[in-house]
Amino acid sequence: MKLIAREAPHIHHNDSAKTVMGDVILSLLPIYFISYCFYGLRAVVLGLISVVTCCIADIICNKLRGRRINFYDLSPVVTGMIIALMLPASIGYDVVIAAGLFAILVAKHPFGGVGQNIFNPAAAGLAFAVASWPTKVFSYPQLFEKLPIFTEFTGKLTESSVSVLNMGGVPLLDKSEMFLGILPGPMGATNILVIIACLIFLSYRKTISLYQFIPFVGGVAVISMLLPRVSVGAAESFALEIMSGSILFGGVFMLSDPATSPKRRFSRVLYGFTAGLLAMIIRLTSGFEQPVVFAILIMNIFSELFDPITDRIYSYIERRGKDAISKIKKGTQNT
Amino acid sequence: MQYQKLRKARRTLKATDGFIWHNDVLFSGFALPFIVVAATSLKNAAALCIAMLFSTVPTALIMSFIPVKFPKWLRAPLACIFSMIFVLLSYFPIQFISLEIFDSIGIFLPLVAVSSLIFELSDSNLHGKWADATIGAGMRTLGFAAVAIIAGFIRELLGSGTIWGIAVMKYKIPGFLPVFSGFILTAFLAAAIRQIWRAIMAAYIRAENPLPDLKEKERSGMA
Amino acid sequence: METIFKFILMALTAITLENAVFARGFGVFRAYKMSSKPRTLAAFCISITCLTFMTSLLTWSASWLIGEFLPEAPIVYIRPFVFLICAILAYLIFYPLAAKVKPASFAEFKDLIPMAAFNCTVLGASLISAHQSLPFESWAGFGLGTGIGYFIAALIVNYGRSLIHIADIPRVFKGLPIMLLFIGLVSLALYGLVGHQLPI
């Protein structure tokens, strides 16, 4: 019998870890293109620096662990690309490097490496960046502003629509502008149209599960409609919250990490819904503009619990169903 | 395989139990709140070291004189009372570190009196062996001090860009100051000390048991 | 009604935002050591919860008495010592009470009670409440919440231990280092709920 060794995650599918990561990279490239159109070459350079940092850190960790370097393991590339897209285009390169190093050296390799990490590395790296430099991470340049590549940006920085919502105001933006991402915000998280297109592509390729994403949006909707932060209608509040900040981007690219997600369908529904609720609760309590990274970290802690809970629910329903059927049969026999 | 050098080294190092040999903080996890939360600067670390020294050594000495017949369930509260008295006495030298030292350490200074180290000292079987008890407590305090100073130095330098309150670096990473970074830094220090120990033990074993020269073996085999 | 609401709110704050283990590092050593033995962990955590709550009630009374009769006293020196005496009183009440109420469990776990009574969690909860000058209902709620929060944190540490056990951890990280990393990342996740560093 020929045994084939494969890297985790072990997906029972024709696809491999390489194709899954490859699909995600393909879907992130249009977002980088849009960022290039909005912010110039600096957006691409930020992404490159982030990817190179993550890859070098990954190689060093593999060498220290005595493992051979797997060039088909594209997970550090995905981590690097996601980290850069969740940050402003004007952010210093040091922040991106620090976030990338934290993601690989603290959240990924000490826990076993690819497929065995408990926490999403990109979420951990971004959470570290947010906790360390909240002012820098939540200040954004204007669109179509010429950003320098080799020096620090010293121009005017502005707030995002999330900051306006935090202060109880309504962003003075057209919904179409918010949908097309023509507003200051994280480099890759503002263009809702492109993110939805990426979502459709990834769900068609079965890289991500809609059983997780749709309940996630549902969770966001529940809190934004029941506890609106501004005096607008429920639907308007939901639209403002979902199109502001990086909640949608996080829901598509970070929540569905196969290593940290539950496996069963119903578990994913519960997981996604709880993550959505939590992301909005964090937005309301702490005022952080990127609550989705913290919500994902908290959900990662409990992700392994969802499958056993679902198993118990299924076995309970099956048992009750069998009891009901046997009672009906007894009743028909007696008559 | 020969292990004489290794055994001799271990016997020598066991005298430093709690400090170099099996550091209490990095190997066993004692007194972690002080390292993780409070040791965010060298001044804080120094104050915690003074408080720990004042509380552990005299408490260990006094507890070694408590008779064996004394009820076990009353040893811990007695040790904590003595420890608290000595910690409050340590406030006098600590106040000379800086004017804001009590504000920057907060509640963690009096909490030294109820740290897990004090509990371990109260529970130890060193009745009558006052010299061993004092030396043991001293070693444990040195172990705590070493970790506190290293952690305080790293966190202050990288988190605030200062050493002992004096600005030395413009660049800083404020993420080194919150509690989560204390846990992560302590984890890496614990991993580093394990790796260093493993390398030292391996060096001792290799010194006594050198690897055979394979080429020599082949030549002697062919001859 | 408002009193009950404040009590519950403060308890919830102590459980989540100001968790004893993840926000202040209290009792990490004990939670880690006992996480491999669920029954011992449960007995320890129940003891800590009861003792923290009882100590909170006594320390609030002591703090009120100090404020009433010794307003000029140097509070920096008197308060920690008086609070320690309150913790010892709570221990002296709890120890024989546990022996009477649950003799079988007491015989098995009596060595844990001194550990539960004299640690940073019990005294720390009272010192934090005094530092923040909380009213009685909030003080008591914070004490109870700290104990329950410690219990939940210990369960999370136990659960994390089972997750980490099956992973291919590098040898230098096995044991205490990886558990500290896990607790650190959970602390980072909960930092997002608070939004800022808590005062010490």
Image (cartoon, rainbow, N blue to C red):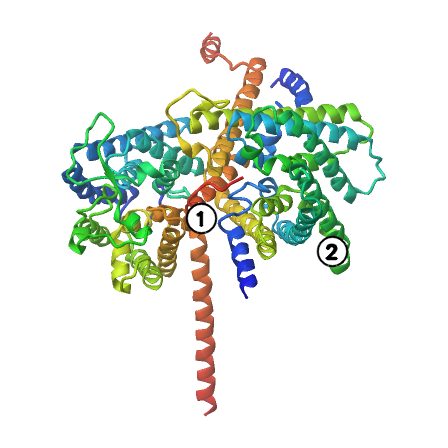
State the residue at coordinates (78%, 43%).
B74
Q: Chain of mark 2?
A: C
Q: Is residue C55 left or right of residue A102?
A: right
Can residue A263 be seen?
no
* Quarter placement of the N terminus of chain A: top left
Q: Circle 1 sits in a helix, a strand or a loop, which is it? A: helix
Which residue is disc 1 drawn over?
A: A301
Which residue is disc 2 drawn over?
A: C98
State which quadrant residue A239 falls in: bottom left
Q: Chain of mark 1?
A: A
Q: Circle 2 sits in a helix, a strand or a loop, which is it? A: helix
- Residue C78 numbered tag: none
Q: Amino acid at mark 1?
A: Ile
Residues A226 and A207: in front is: A226
Specify few, some or many for label 1: CA neighbours under 10 Å numbering under 14, 14-19, or 20 or more: many
Q: Residue C200: x, y in percent?
A: 54, 39
Specify few, some or many for label 2: CA neighbours under 10 Å numbering under 14, 14-19, or 20 or more: some
Residues B168 and C191: in front is: B168
Is residue A126 placed above or below C148 in the rendered structure? above
In front: mark 2 or mark 1?
A: 2
Residues C171 and A285: in front is: A285
Name the residue at the top extreme.
Answer: B223
Q: Residue C186: x, y in percent?
A: 46, 44
